[in-house]
Structures are given as structure tokens and as C-alpha cells.
Amino acid sequence: MQIFIVMLLLTLAMIIVAYLLGSISSAILICKMLGLPDPRTTGSNNPGATNVLRISNKFTAASVLFLDILKGTVPVWGAYFLQVEPLYLGIVGVAACLGHMYPIFFNFQGGKAVATALGTLLPIGLGLGFLLIITWVAVAKLTKYSSLAAIVTVSMAPLYVFLLKPLYVYPTLMLSALIIFRHKGNIVRLLKGTESKISTKIK
């Protein structure tokens, strides 16, 4: 019983830590440090790497991407190291993404959490990370739509996980559903043909 209580408290603590880490918006902070416009009010109004690319350069966008991935990887990897159960690992990952989407430090105005979701999946294996990145890049190069690339990638993620490590399929489904829900506005614009394309060429 004591072990159960300890693990429950540990899991709750990791969920809170994940949300707080997710709430640190690297896009907003980096743009502020560099004197760039607030990404929440410029371009696609999304504080993420793709929008930062629109208003700055590849290096700045890559820095945002790296930090957004990291804040998803750190809490999930930490929870995995502490032997948190697979299903609860998924909840930790969702908490990190919710932090990015609704950051407590930035008036709950956040991004779509695609990079953070990728970060939460990386502890499953580098092979999975490679497949997800290749999928995103391929769709983005073909269509020039960052949102479509994200939707396709997270839709494929449960299949990739099923093929590589089936134990984590349900947590991955939770993440995928959350990211797709967050892109509901993008889906409507894609169907209407009014979605913004990536303005910088992907090489």
C-alpha cells in the first residue's frame, strides 16, 4: 500500500512538473530576447518554431524547436527513469503538451505542441523519432503546409509505435488525439484552401 501511495504521489508530481515545463514558451522568450514581434500576434499567431521561422530565421526557429522538443523529453524520460507505468507516462506527456498549449506563465495563450509531443515520444526510441521527423519533412516538402505535416505525422505515430513498441500505443493515441484536436482550426482552413503555407523553402 505504501509503495502504491508513493508511486501515485510521484506520478502526480511528474504530471505537475511536466505541465510547468511545458508552460515555458521558448518561442515567446526567444523572440522577446531578440527584439522580435510576439509570435502570438504575428504570422500565424502561433508561438511555435514554424511561425518563428516566418518572422525571423532558421537558426532562431531551430533553437525554438530544440527547446520545445526538450521540454517534452525531459519529464517523460524522468518519469520513465522513475518507473512510472506506461499509461501514466502518456498522461505526463499530455501534461507537457497542455502546458505548451495553455501556459500558465503566458496567460494560457500557447501553441499547438507538435514539437513538444515529438519530445514526449523520443524516450520510446530514436527509431520512432526518425520516422516521425521523416514523415513531417516529407509532407511539409510536398505540400508546404506545416499544419498538414503535423496532422499526418501525429496520425501515423500510433502505427509507428505499434510496430516498434506496442506497450506505448495507448499513451501515443492520447497524445495524437490531443494534437489533432488542437489543429481543428487548421483542418477547417485546409479544407477551405485558406491555410497559410511555409514561406521559407525546406531543404
Image (spheres, grey):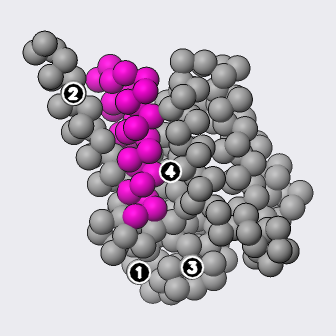
Q: Position of residue 46 (x, y in %)?
A: 56, 73
Residue range (magenta): 73-102
- Numbered disc in front, either 2 or 1: 2
Q: Position of residue 7 (x, y in %)?
A: 21, 23
Marks 2/1: CA–CA distance: 38 Å
In the picture, the disc for residue 45 is 3
> Which image quadrant: the N terminus?
top left
- Residue corresponding to mark 2: 8
> In this view of the protein, can residue 127 be seen by the observer?
no
Q: Is residue 81 magenta?
A: yes
How busy is the neighbourhood of tag 1: few (under 14 within 10 Å), some, or many (20 plus)? Answer: few
Helix, strand or loop at mark 2: helix
Helix, strand or loop at mark 1: helix
The kind of residue on which mark 3 rests is: Asn
Q: Main secondary structure of the magenta part?
A: helix
Helix, strand or loop at mark 4: helix
- Residue corresponding to mark 1: 32
Marks 2/3: CA–CA distance: 38 Å
Relative placement, left or right, of 52 versus 106 is: right
- Numbered disc in front, either 1 or 3: 3
> Which image quadrant: the C terminus?
bottom right
Q: Position of residue 60 (x, y in %)?
A: 56, 69
Label 2 with label 1: CB-CB less than 8 Å: no
